[in-house]
């Protein structure tokens, strides 16, 4: 019995000592662990938007152009934002026939377009100012296109059916 008591006292002492040492190591180790792994950095202004592709693999986005709502399809193959005439009219943009001074190659062929400048284009808090765009006849464009004149001024990545915009 005496041997058992001595053995239990030794085990208790070892456990107490080990517990104290672990507490010291944890207390000493916490600051090093906290400073060794800094938190991930947010983008410069902290704005990130994630778009999910639709069934066709396209990215649809509700944007605001000069404060007004406009639906777009994201198109990395479009050099600039392309606005249908009807959408441009809702924004107060009414190019005359003489304003259709440029040509653009589209899936429907070469069409005359009216170059315009948009003051501000916003996608869920990501804002780009002074953005080039083209006004296009409705019959030459089925949907508004959010092109590279916007996309080239934000960081964007495509991964597994998601388009991530950062500013």
Image (cartoon, rainbow, N blue to C red):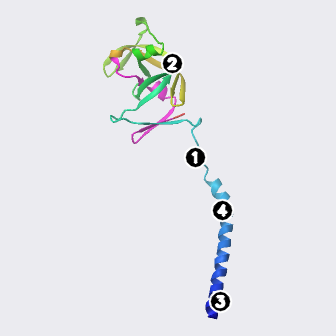
Q: Do the numbered discs 3 and 1 sit on residues whose CB atoms are within 8 Å?
A: no
Circle number at residue 6:
3
Q: Residue 75: horizontal and vertical position, in percent?
A: 40, 28
Dot 3 alpha-carbon crowd within 10 angstroms: few under 14, some 14 to 19, many 20 or more: few
161 left or right of 128? left
Helix, strand or loop at label 4? It is helix
Can residue 146 be seen from the camera position used here?
Answer: no
Helix, strand or loop at label 3? It is helix
Foreground tag (3 vs 4)? 3
Residue at left 38%, top 17%? 104
Q: Do the numbered discs 3 and 2 sit on residues whose CB atoms are within 8 Å?
A: no
Indicate yes or no whether the magenta region holds residue 38.
no
Circle number at residue 40:
1
Question: First in sequence: mark 3 or mark 1?
Answer: 3
Name the quarter where the N terminus is drawn: bottom right
Question: First in sequence: mark 3 or mark 2?
Answer: 3
Residue at left 63%, top 58%? 33
Q: Residue 51: horizontal and vertical position, in percent?
A: 44, 36
Name the quarter where the C terminus is drawn: top right
Foreground tag (3 vs 2)? 3
Kindly indicate the quadrant of the structure image that contains residue 144.
top left
Residue hosting label 2: 118
Q: Residue furthest left?
A: 108
Question: First in sequence: mark 3 or mark 4?
Answer: 3
User: Where are the magenta residues, as a range?
Assistant: 140-165
Circle number at residue 29:
4
């Amino acid at each position: 019995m005496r041997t058992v008591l001595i053995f239990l006292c030794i085990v208790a002492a070892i456990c107490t000592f080990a517990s104290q040492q672990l507490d010291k190591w944890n207390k000493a180790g916490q600051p090093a662990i906290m400073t060794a792994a800094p938190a991930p950095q947010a983008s410069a202004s902290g704005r990130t938007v994630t778009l999910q592709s639709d069934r066709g693999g396209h990215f649809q986005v509700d944007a605001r152009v000069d404060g007004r709502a406009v639906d777009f399809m994201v198109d990395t193959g479009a050099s600039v934002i392309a606005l249908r005439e009807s959408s441009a009219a809702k924004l107060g943009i009414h190019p005359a026939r003489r304003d259709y001074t440029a040509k653009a190659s589209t899936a429907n062929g070469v069409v005359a377009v009216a170059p315009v400048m948009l003051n501000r284009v916003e996608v869920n808090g990501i804002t780009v100012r002074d953005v080039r765009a083209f006004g296009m006849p409705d019959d030459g464009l089925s949907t508004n296109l959010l092109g590279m004149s916007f996309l080239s001024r934000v960081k964007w990545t495509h991964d597994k059916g998601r388009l991530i915009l950062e500013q």
